[in-house]
Image: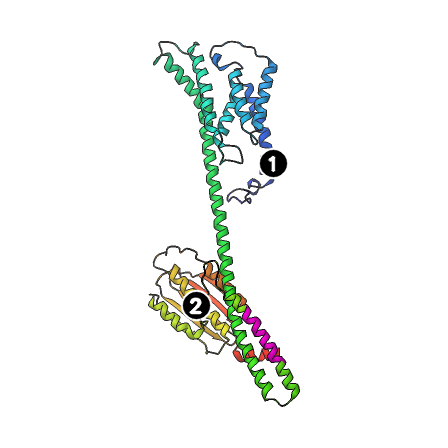
Amino acid sequence: MEHSVARVPGLPSWLQPGSRLRRFAHWLYPFALGCGVTLFSFVSPLRPPIFLFDGLDTDAPWALVALAMLAAGVSAAWVRRARWPLFVVSLVTWLGMTMMAAVFVASYYAGAGRPGRPHRPGRAWPYFLAASTLVGVPVGWSAVHSDLLYEGMTGGLLFGAVLTGSFWVGMTVVLPFVFGLWVRARRQVLEQLRDRAERLEREQHERAERARSEERRRIAREMHDVVAHRVALMVLHAGALEVSTADPRTAEEAALIRTTGREAMQELREVLGMLRAPDLSDGTAPDLAPQPTLADLDRLLDASRAAGLPVRRVDVGQRQEVSLSAQRTAYRVVQEALTNVAKHAGAVPTTVTLRHEPYGLVVAVENAPPPQPAPPMPESGLGLVGLTERVGLAGGTVQARPRLDGGFLLHARIPADPPEQLATREVAA
């Protein structure tokens, strides 16, 4: 699974993942590893490990030494594609010439796994057991049959052989193997954290899109209800004019208006049928109750007070008749704000302010700071997304910000032309 390159906080730009330096280092790493294993393989006793402490001068053919060094370096450079060549070559070069560099690197990659696939450790433990045996037994044998150990030492020859072999196994096999296991575990943890972060981000994005979609569908249903009502009145008046007029041309125009209005009504019914269809995912139908207006605001505040939320209403300015859509939007603003107060602040004093302006409504909901931080609620924060979508489609703006004392303020400005001005504009259009 490929992941997008994320920026790591605290690192300079030239060390960030995806930078040129990091890409160059990733490309250069196999060559550097192969060259390092080749060079360090030369610093070896160049004799079998069973003669490690015998002090024999075994002049191995330089062609064979060069071939072993080259094989160790190439297998180490090839480790990104396959690990088994390095495993085999490391054990062969150890048994033949006691080359430790390849064994050290192979033990690390046995624990860390193949680069790019840390979740697939492969045959790590078989190699660990084989390498520990092939390193410890020959070294212990060489220690017993050399001048390194003597019979009078503490614990005897057997204890000294075991101690010597264990030391070489620990430094050559166990230490890099354990470090590789730690690196692999760390990679797996980072991989899981990255997957979890991407999943949470994806779920949050889906919830936000679902909230926007639901809010738009509800707004569309409300607007179509209003348009359907007005078209019905238009059809009714056109029919009355067709029957009552004595002018044939006027009667024809009224009949045309009535027919067009009925066709529009039929199309609106189809749209409303689609919007009000049951949700096939859970089988529940949307709420078909009449949409609330500012006349229902006091009932909403009373319900909040009954739930234990001390809330008061303040009206500023002279009340004016505004469109039903603006009233519904203002009602939804107050409803969402009170819901957020109950979720995140608890039963704290809250003030709902309605400012009546000549061409709009200003709704402000302020709550006092909570006595103690409230626990986070699941799926919180998406109501403001839908609310911003609703007010934005109405041509207004929403601001939500914390106050300096720890409280919270939700401020919405909603354009609201009076109903008579709306009717005048429609007739003029």
Inspect the image, locate mark 1, and give the three-letter code of the amino acid beneath it. Answer: Phe
Residue 271 is situated, as x and y percent measured from the top left of the image, at 55, 68
Residue 258 is situated, as x and y percent measured from the top left of the image, at 60, 80
Q: Which residues are magenta?
A: 256-270
Q: Quadrant of the N terminus?
A: top right
**Residue 24 — which label?**
1
Q: Residue at x 48, y 69 (%)?
A: 329
* Residue 265 belongs to the span the image colors magenta: yes
Q: Secondary structure at mark 1?
A: helix
* Residue 260 belongs to the span the image colors magenta: yes
Q: Residue at x 47, y 19 (%)?
A: 134
Q: Secondary structure at mark 2?
A: helix
In terms of sequence position, does the residue under pointer 2 or pointer 1 come before the other? Answer: 1
Q: Is residue 103 visible?
A: yes
Q: Is residue 390 above or below residue 169?
A: below
Q: Residue at x 33, y 68 (%)?
A: 306
Inspect the image, locate mark 2, and give the three-letter code of the amino acid beneath it. Answer: Val
Specify the quadrant of the image occupied by residue 406.
bottom left
Question: Furthest residue to the bottom?
Answer: 246
Few, some or many residues within 10 Å of mark 2 (<14, 14–19, 20+): many
Q: CA distance from mark 2 to mark 1?
A: 57 Å
Q: Does residue 51 appear to the left or right of 306 in the view shown?
A: right
Q: Is 397 or 321 nearer to us in this picture?
A: 321
Few, some or many residues within 10 Å of mark 1 (<14, 14–19, 20+): few
Q: Is residue 391 visible?
A: no
Residue 336 is situated, as x and y percent measured from the top left of the image, at 43, 64
Q: Mark 2 — residue?
A: 334
Q: Is 281 or 223 nearer to us in this picture?
A: 281
Q: Main secondary structure of the magenta part?
A: helix
